[in-house]
Image (cartoon, coloured by chain):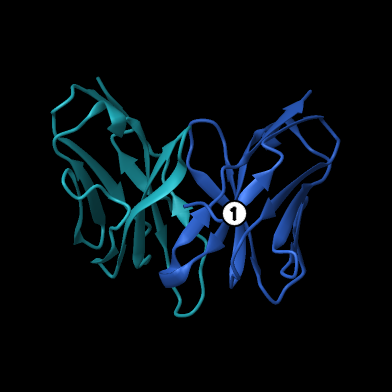
Chain colours: A blue, B cyan
Amino acid sequence: SQQGEEDPQALSIQEGENATMNCSYKTSINNLQWYRQNSGRGLVHLILIRSNEREKHSGRLRVTLDTSKKSSSLLITASRAADTASYFCATDRADYKLSFGAGTTVTVRA
Amino acid sequence: DARVTQTPRHKVTEMGQEVTMRCQPILGHNTVFWYRQTMMQGLELLAYFRNRAPLDDSGMPKDRFSAEMPDATLATLKIQPSEPRDSAVYFCASERAVSGFNQPQHFGDGTRLSIL
């Protein structure tokens, strides 16, 4: 079953704009991860944020975590055509398993 | 860059045939996961191994699916007999598990399976 739910399901933006997507989850977590999936490829890990962290940065990516609201957001700044992909949040479950959301499909228009 | 390798990348076969998918995890990774991805169900965990021992295969239909790890460099997922509803993309992922903490999982590019 999916614990994380991304919002929106799809997002279309102009190159250079920022893209923000959100993830909500139901039960308490130890950490939350974000992954990217390009068409026809496997998932690629982007960022892992632990439950005692509030914000994390990696290049043009910024992730926030609000455990009181059980939500996380992923911000991509200054988007590029290469950022076109599906983005998934994943929350940890018992025994090191991850539960993936349904994903947000991002299209960056040139 | 170290990568998870999956073979075959594509497989088309007829209903009732046996299908075997293979995965070579990243050297040094001690945990291997099998996932299935479909439009309807998203990404589902089928089974996973730690240090080659199966830890959980509750996501797998037991009557037709089997997963093994004959050695540290090879994981296999077998479907026998295959059915059209098994059509999906099957991903293998590996992780260097550290006690008490999740680590990033590294995914292969999947096997796209079509059962006719």
* Residue B90, image x, y percentages: 36, 40
Say above or below: A103 vs B1.
Answer: above
Q: How many marks?
A: 1
* Residue B109, image x, y percentages: 42, 40
Say above or below: A38 vs A6.
Answer: above
Residue in view at x 63 percent, y 58 percent: A25
* Residue A66, image x, y percentages: 75, 66
Query: Dot 1 corresponds to which residue?
Result: A4
From the image, which quarter does the C terminus of chain A lie in?
top right
Which residue of the protein is positioned furthest toward the bottom in this rendering? B99
- Apparent side of residue B8 relative to residue B108 in the rendered image (left or right): left
Residue in view at x 33 percent, y 42 percent: B6
- Apparent side of residue B110 relative to residue A71 in the rendered image (left or right): left
Q: Amino acid at mark 1?
A: Gly
Which is nearer the eye, A69 or B66? A69
Residue in view at x 85 percent, y 35 percent: A16
* Residue B40, image x, y percentages: 47, 34
Q: Quadrant of residue B96?
A: bottom left
**How would you rate the neighbour count of disc 1 (Cα within 10 Å): few for under 14, some for 14-19, many for 20 or more?**
many
Say above or below: B72 vs A86.
Answer: below
Which is nearer the eye, B58 or B95? B58
Which residue of the protein is positioned furthest toward the front in this rendering? A26
- Apparent side of residue A86 relative to residue A94 in the rendered image (left or right): right
Chain under disc 1: A
Element assignment for label 1: loop
Which is nearer the eye, B47 or A25? A25
